[in-house]
Amino acid sequence: MTSANSPLVGKVALVTGASSGIGEATAAALAEAGAKVAVAARRADRLQALAGRIEKTGGKALTIEADIAKDGDVTAMVDKVVAQWGRLDILVNNAGIMLLSPAAEASLEDWRRMIELNLLGLMATTKAALPHLKTAKGHIVNVSSVAGRVANPGATGYAATKFGVVAFSESLRREVYADKVRVTVIEPGLVRTELGDHITNAEFKAGLENRLATMEALTAGDIANAILYAVSQPPRVNVNEILIRPTDQER
């Protein structure tokens, strides 16, 4: 249950990739902190269930079925949030996929899907939301990865998109700081989510599962807490970057 003392009361947030994992946990955390939260993803049934949980505890949620790899969906998504609540204060660009494979064996279609969703979709969503975020002196949170800092073998396409997210975020920060818009990039290490389920290369899918079995991975809630920390800071504070790994993850 939110109260007048909740740090995000009066704020409107949009979270992409909200049907599971980090996006789902982040939407719940922002709502608990008092924000009205628009949750966007392709799986409408999951979004409805999430919205029901948020509203059951006194929060407000708006579900938007959208594929951010499609320009029309991106524009309609942002327009729907502003039409419903009149503003947009926080954008969490979380939607993404991880399709690991060595470059020599990689599917060009897998690379294309990651570029279109992880990078271009994030950029398009930011562009569509930016006029409203400038008006609100808002906050953009882009979910990258440790793979946006350390390019491991087998993560060629994925790392390329996540390095791109980091570069885009820093360039954007320098463009919008005078408008009092804050930009934060979040770089999680191994998190126990559905992200690995989509890997089509059997060897690398098994490798990820083996790594997860050898350590206590982060939870989606851990990343949601980091995002909540960043967006809850006073307007004078811009947390530019949070790199967060499991304690027992080396790289």
Image (cartoon, helix red, strand yellow):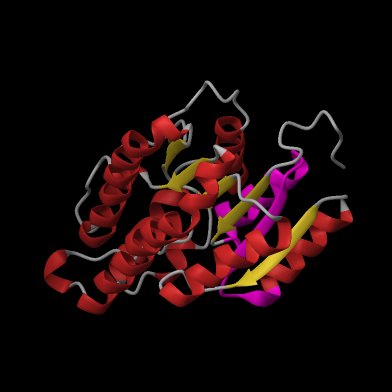
Query: Which residue sits at x=28%, y=40%?
Result: 171
Q: Position of residue 60 (x, y in %)?
A: 79, 55
Report whether residue 250 is seen: no
Q: In which quarter of the view is residue 78 placed?
A: bottom right
Query: Which residue sits at x=20%, y=58%?
Result: 156
In this rendering, is residue 114 above or below 30? Answer: below
Q: In which quarter of the view is residue 223 placed?
A: top right
Q: Nearer the viewer, residue 48 or 151?
A: 48
In this rendering, is residue 233 above or below 96? Answer: above
Q: Position of residue 214 (x, y in %)?
A: 44, 45
Determine the residue located farthest toward the left in the rendered image: 104
Q: Position of residue 148 (x, y in %)?
A: 29, 45
Q: Nearer the viewer, residue 57 or 137?
A: 137
Q: Does 81 sit left or right of 241 as displayed?
A: right
The quadrant the N terminus occupies is top right
Q: Does 44 sit left or right of 181 as displayed?
A: right
The quadrant the C terminus occupies is top left
Please check the rendered image and state whether residue 74 is part of the magenta-colored stretch, yes or no.
no
Query: Which residue sits at x=39%, y=62%?
Result: 124
Q: Does 191 sit left or right of 57 as displayed?
A: left
Q: Does 221 sit left or right of 93 as displayed?
A: right
Please check the rendered image and state whether residue 21 is part of the magenta-colored stretch, yes or no.
yes
Q: Nearer the viewer, residue 114 or 5?
A: 5
Q: Position of residue 227 (x, y in %)?
A: 56, 38
Magenta segment range? Answer: 18-45
Query: Which residue sits at x=72%, y=44%?
Result: 35
Report whether residue 170 is seen: yes
